Structure formats: structure tokens, C-alpha cells
């Protein structure tokens, strides 16, 4: 049950509410495809594939994404990586030196960095020992200046997805915006929260082309939310934040997702196989359940094992400095050959 009415207007920063957005050349004249002479944006007239500014609203790309997810273009924001999407959310809703956000370590480090950059207090509510959300504690940490709760499901670095009931309790009882980072959703057994956007006006779902889509080098992130939330974010985004090459490459990939879907299938098979085999490595003490393309394990001595693995030419992530993650290493699932060589190596240590 919704306890109070969700008032988006109340959450927007005053300067953003009053802002007159920059109007770009490509805002003032939108091409309808007919052949025109462009003498409006001080671009070079000489064609080389990128001499013209890109579409500031990335319409072609958004149309494909909208269709794929049964949403409208107005529910979508694209950014230079999900890092930019998250940064825009901070800048639209969080007043520096005054507002606060809540995050649940151990989780993705960028949330805390973005809070720091934007001078926003980050109230940390640790996950439980089993890496689950402590919903009561989160809700009792909320005050009138809590604008965002950020969570990542499946969570990085722990790998697990959070309980649907817990997330729904947060959505129902929190009057600010709940951001669910679904960077790893394509590897998850659990369903996406995208189809709950209608039901929860305070929900923002972020996605990325960097993981399952295999395009970390492109820098393309997605924010999905109500039309009202997206309209606010569009007011403050840099006009040409997604470049022409990125738009084209992502468009092409979305027209042929079979390759990516095959890769996801292979990664999941490899992940489950790795989990089985890691159980036989003598210095691995615990393998945490994973819904992502990586596996977090507890070892006898993480600094020592990290160094030994590195010396053999394999780079893994030592997550030991994170809350609740003492002596843990995180392995990203590689190709079948890479995974076999990792296992061979671990067996010799
Ligand atoms: C990798 C990752 C991202 C991706 O960020 P981009 O800026 O889109 O590359 C986002 N969130 C989490 C939790 C991640 O692990």
C-alpha cells in the first residue's frame, strides 16, 4: 500500500526546476529526412562520417530500445555510460551540502564517488551477513532530505539479486526515487523491474551496454523511468552527450541481438561450470551465489592469492577492502579457454 502520495515536483532541485535548457541547432531544426543544406551549426561541410553533430535525442536508437522493452521513447534517457546517467540523476534531484542518498555496501563504488563529487551525504546501510537488504534499517535512515536510494541488483561485487518483496517494500514506502542498477540483469534468473515502471512512479532503472552487450568501449548507458522523470533529466543533459559513432554501432548491434544472446548463454554455462570446479580449489573457503557474469569467493589469504594469480598473468579483482568482503576475490567469467586456464592455474597454487 502506498502510504503517501509521491510528489516528483518536490524532489527537483530549485535551479533545475527554473532552468531554461540549452537549445541546440538540432533541436531547432529537426530533419525529416528530406535533403536539406545545413548551414546552421557551424559544422564543417566536408563529409567524413562524423562532420555533423549527432542526434541530441538519439531517436533511432531509442525507438529500437523502446520496442524491445514495450516502452515509449519518452521513458528513455541515454548517457555516456551509466555513470553519466547516474550523475544526471544526482544533479537533477540532490541539492549539494543539503540532501542525502542511501546506499547499501558492499556495492558498486561509483555511487559513493558520485555522492562525493556532487557534495551529497551518502548514508550507508550495510547489507546483512547474507548480502540481503536490511529494509527496516534503510527506511528508518530516510529523512526529509533523502532524495535517492541506490541499489544494484544483481549486486556488484556480491553477485546476488535482492528479494523482490524487499525491493517492493522500499518502492512502496520511500517517497524519494529508488534507482535500481540493472547492469547485470541479462545474466540473472530474476526478472527486470522495467515492467513495474507504470506501477511505481518513483522507480528509475539503469542499464548499460558495457557488460552483456559486450560494448564497454562505446560508453553507453540507459536510464528508464516515468516520462516526467526522464523529461527532467533531459533538461540538464549535455545536448550531444552520445556521440555519432556510439549511436550507429549500438543501433547496428540491436538489429542483430542473436550474437549477444548466444554469448550470454555461453557465459552462463561457463559460470555454472566454474562454480562447480572452484569448489575443489583448496584455498577457496566459500563461493557466493551469483546471478551475474562474475563470481565472488572467500579465500584463505586474498592479498597473497591475488598476487600469485597476477604473477601468472591473470588479473582478478581483490574486493577485500569492501565491507563484509574480507579475503574475497572476484572472478569475471571469461571465454571457455580463459576459464580453463584460470582453473589450471588455481589448482597449482
Ligand atoms: C559495470 C557496471 C556499470 C557500468 O557502468 P558504465 O558506465 O555503463 O560502463 C554500472 N553499474 C554497475 C553496478 C556495474 O558493475
Image (cartoon, helix red, strand yellow):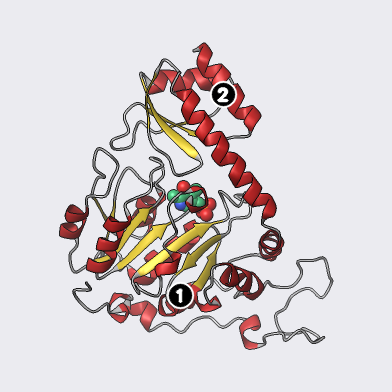
Residue 251 placement, left or right of 234:
right
Vertical position of residue 27 compared to residue 210: above or below: below
In the drawing, what numbered circle is on residue 230?
A: 1
Q: Tell me, yes or no, if residue 106 can be seen here.
A: yes
Residue that badge 2 annotates: 342
Q: How many marks?
A: 2
Q: Quadrant of the N terminus?
A: bottom left
Which one is in front, 306 or 25? 306
Q: Position of residue 150 (x, y in %)?
A: 34, 57
Q: Residues within 10 Å of mark 1 (few under 14, many from 20)?
A: many
Which one is in front, 183 or 79? 183
Q: Position of residue 329 (x, y in %)?
A: 42, 29
Q: Position of residue 347 (x, y in %)?
A: 51, 15
Q: Position of residue 333 (x, y in %)?
A: 55, 35
Q: Residues within 10 Å of mark 2 (few under 14, many from 20)?
A: many
**Secondary structure beneath label 2:** helix
Q: Tell me the residue at 18%/74% (across/down).
A: 3
Amino acid at each position: 500500500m502506498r502510504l503517501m502520495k509521491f510528489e516528483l515536483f518536490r524532489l527537483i532541485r530549485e535551479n533545475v526546476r527554473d532552468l531554461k535548457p540549452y537549445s541546440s541547432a538540432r533541436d531547432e531544426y529537426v530533419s525529416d529526412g528530406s535533403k536539406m543544406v545545413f548551414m546552421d551549426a557551424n559544422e564543417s561541410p566536408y563529409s567524413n562520417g562524423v562532420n555533423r553533430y549527432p542526434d541530441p535525442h538519439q531517436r533511432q536508437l531509442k525507438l529500437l530500445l523502446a520496442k524491445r522493452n514495450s516502452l515509449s521513447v519518452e521513458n528513455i534517457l541515454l548517457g555516456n555510460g551509466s555513470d553519466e546517467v547516474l550523475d544526471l540523476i544526482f544533479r537533477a534531484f540532490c541539492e549539494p551540502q543539503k540532501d542525502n542518498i542511501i546506499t547499501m555496501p558492499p556495492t558498486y563504488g561509483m555511487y559513493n564517488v558520485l555522492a562525493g563529487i556532487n557534495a551529497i551525504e551518502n548514508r550507508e546501510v550495510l547489507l546483512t551477513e547474507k548480502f540481503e537488504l536490511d529494509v527496516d534499517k534503510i527506511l528508518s535512515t530516510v529523512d526529509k532530505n533523502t532524495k535517492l536510494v541506490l541499489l544494484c541488483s544483481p549486486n556488484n561485487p556480491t553477485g546476488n539479486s535482492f528479494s523482490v518483496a524487499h525491493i517492493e517494500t522500499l518502492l512502496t514506502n520511500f517517497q524519494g526515487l529508488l534507482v535500481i542498477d540493472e547492469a547485470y540483469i541479462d545474466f540473472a534468473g530474476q526478472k527486470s523491474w522495467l515492467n513495474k515502471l507504470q506501477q511505481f512512479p518513483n522507480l528509475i532503472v539503469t542499464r548499460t551496454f558495457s557488460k552483456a552487450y559486450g560494448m564497454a568501449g562505446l560508453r553507453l548507458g540507459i536510464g528508464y523511468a516515468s516520462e516526467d522523470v526522464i523529461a527532467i533529466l533531459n533538461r540538464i543533459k549535455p545536448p550531444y552527450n552520445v556521440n555519432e559513432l556510439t549511436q550507429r554501432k549500438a543501433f547496428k548491434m540491436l538489429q542483430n541481438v542473436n550474437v549477444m544472446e548466444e554469448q550470454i548463454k555461453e557465459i552462463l554455462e561457463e559460470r555454472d561450470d566454474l562454480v562447480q570446479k572452484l569448489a575443489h580449489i583448496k584455498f577457496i573457503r566459500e563461493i557466493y551465489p551469483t546471478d551475474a557474469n562474475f563470481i565472488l569467493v572467500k579465500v584463505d589469504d586474498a592479498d597473497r592469492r591475488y598476487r600469485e594469480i597476477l604473477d601468472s598473468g591473470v588479473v582478478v579483482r581483490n574486493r577485500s577492502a569492501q565491507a563484509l568482503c574480507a579475503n574475497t576475490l572476484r572472478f569475471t567469467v571469461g571465454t571457455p579457454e580463459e576459464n580453463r586456464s584460470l582453473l589450471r592455474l588455481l589448482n597449482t597454487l
